[in-house]
Amino acid sequence: MTLDDILADLRHQTSRARHAETGFWVASVLRERIAAGQLDPGSKLSEEALGEALGVSRNTLREAFSALAAERIVTRIPNRGVYVAQPSVDDIREIYRVRRYLEPAAVAWSPTTDFTALRRAVERARVARDVGSVGGMADANQAFHASIVALGGSDRLDLVMTQILAEMRLVFHSMGADTAFHAPYVEDNIRIVELLEAGDRNDAAALLTDYLRRAEEQLLAEVAAEDA
Amino acid sequence: MTLDDILADLRHQTSRARHAETGFWVASVLRERIAAGQLDPGSKLSEEALGEALGVSRNTLREAFSALAAERIVTRIPNRGVYVAQPSVDDIREIYRVRRYLEPAAVAWSPTTDFTALRRAVERARVARDVGSVGGMADANQAFHASIVALGGSDRLDLVMTQILAEMRLVFHSMGADTAFHAPYVEDNIRIVELLEAGDRNDAAALLTDYLRRAEEQLLAEVAAEDA
DNA sequence: GCGACTTGGATTGTTGAACAATCAGTGAAA
DNA sequence: TTTCACTGATTGTTCAACAATCCAAGTCGC
């Protein structure tokens, strides 16, 4: 889908909110489109064109851009405009650095013993794998890891994780196909839930850390292979 | 200092940046003033008055507000305006929830063995305590905990911690005096650094977790006492 | 008196047009 | 080929206006 198609599509987005939330609404629309991969990483978001397409003034659009820039979904270059973020190799490293602290910490030290959200996510992942749905596996996997951080019970850390996962989607979108990247990890996820349910939090955390280490390596390798 | 004084003061703030960063500049000015306690938590930031005082348009001011709201330094109530954030009891709980994951995780799992920043911070704290400087102790303590998270080497987590510490300052500002809150913890900090330097990361993490638990309890008790 | 409703003023939310500053590219001059 | 000024396009910022919303004060009925 070309950028003009997107713009034409946005023009039909109905029922804009009226007062006190237009900027917020614009931000969420863009967030969706970017998460869905309809706007390629690196593509420029012109204030003029986007504002016209969404039926919104440049000023309001700018407010939305500020929010998205804070979430790192979008990169703002002064006097040059905003672009859909295109995570670099360093960004990937940073993503996994964060995850290697956040996720094991939640697993090891969370006070909850309710793992139903995790169970449900791994089940969805298993079904998606058996059916061969790559998108379903990616979604279920993201839900699994979001649920892991959610064990901690902190809104703030949940928010950080949400942003990290959004950035992960950008990583997958900038690599051509997200291939069968997630398949091998379904078993690990299942094992982690089992360990948690058995009360072996430290083992679960250790496995998770190792898991993240492997995933990072594989991802970096694939990116390097693409650049070559 | 009354709010009008602040506004008059801001009017003399010199040398505004010109293009491509005015919004950013405004945000940093407000951030400073709030951190310094010159703007009381809960006080309203009028777009009209502030914009005039800073010599900046309402639109630009609004961009700054968006940034500060994302950092939770400021609370935005639709159609009512923005107010300097006034952390609630739940916010305090959330702050310590985050810290109890972030700080011990960095201590336990960071790859670095360079603790000079920590050493320097505890030394500053000790000097401040011996001299009786409450402000100095607070600053040194914040630097200490920021350095702990910095062990992790993640920009993102550093940013979260920066925001958490800014919110802590708001907590202290809303309680009348920050009393001798920090004094008892200087010894704990010293002990944590010693454990780290000795390679006992797990013990250091455990002590830190306990430390944070105690600090939270004490803070909640003081707030409850104030409300009564 | 006292509660529900209306009204008015103040403030925020949003827009559109304008101008200033900056950037990328073009083409001419050395 | 390199350099440099110019041009056009886009972003950064301001301003003035209007719409929507909230708050408080007043009004009405009881």
Image (cartoon, coloured by chain):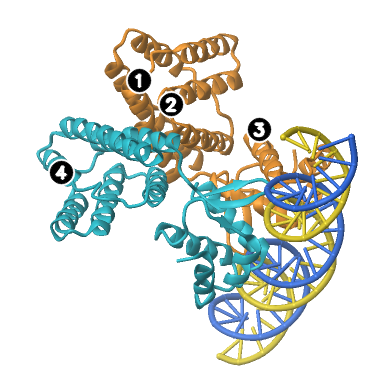
Chain colours: A cyan, B orange, C blue, D yellow
- The residue to which callout 1 is attached is B111
Q: Which element carries disc 2, helix, strand or loop? A: loop
- The residue to which callout 2 is attached is B153
For mark 1, does the 10 Å Cα neighbourhood hold few (<14), some (14 to 19), or many (20 or more) residues? few
For the residues labelled 2 and 1, the Cα–Cα distance comes to: 9 Å
Q: Earlier in the sequence, mark 2 or mark 1?
A: 1
Which label lies toward us, 2 or 3?
2
Q: x, y (%) of residue B95?
A: 43, 38
Which label lies toward us, 3 or 1?
1
Q: Amino acid at mark 3?
A: Ala
Marks 2/1 in contact by CB < 8 Å: the verdict is yes
- The residue to which callout 4 is attached is A193
Q: Amino acid at mark 2?
A: Gly
Q: x, y (%) of residue A55?
A: 61, 73
Instruction: Tell me, yes or no, whether dots 2 and 3 are on the same chain.
Output: yes
- The residue to which callout 3 is attached is B36
Q: Nearer the viewer, residue B85 or A154?
A: A154
Q: Amino acid at mark 4?
A: Val
Q: Which element carries disc 3, helix, strand or loop? A: loop
For the residues labelled 4 and 1, the Cα–Cα distance comes to: 27 Å
Instruction: Tell me, yes or no, whether dots 3 and 4 are on the same chain.
Output: no
Chain letter of the residue beneath label 4 in the structure image: A
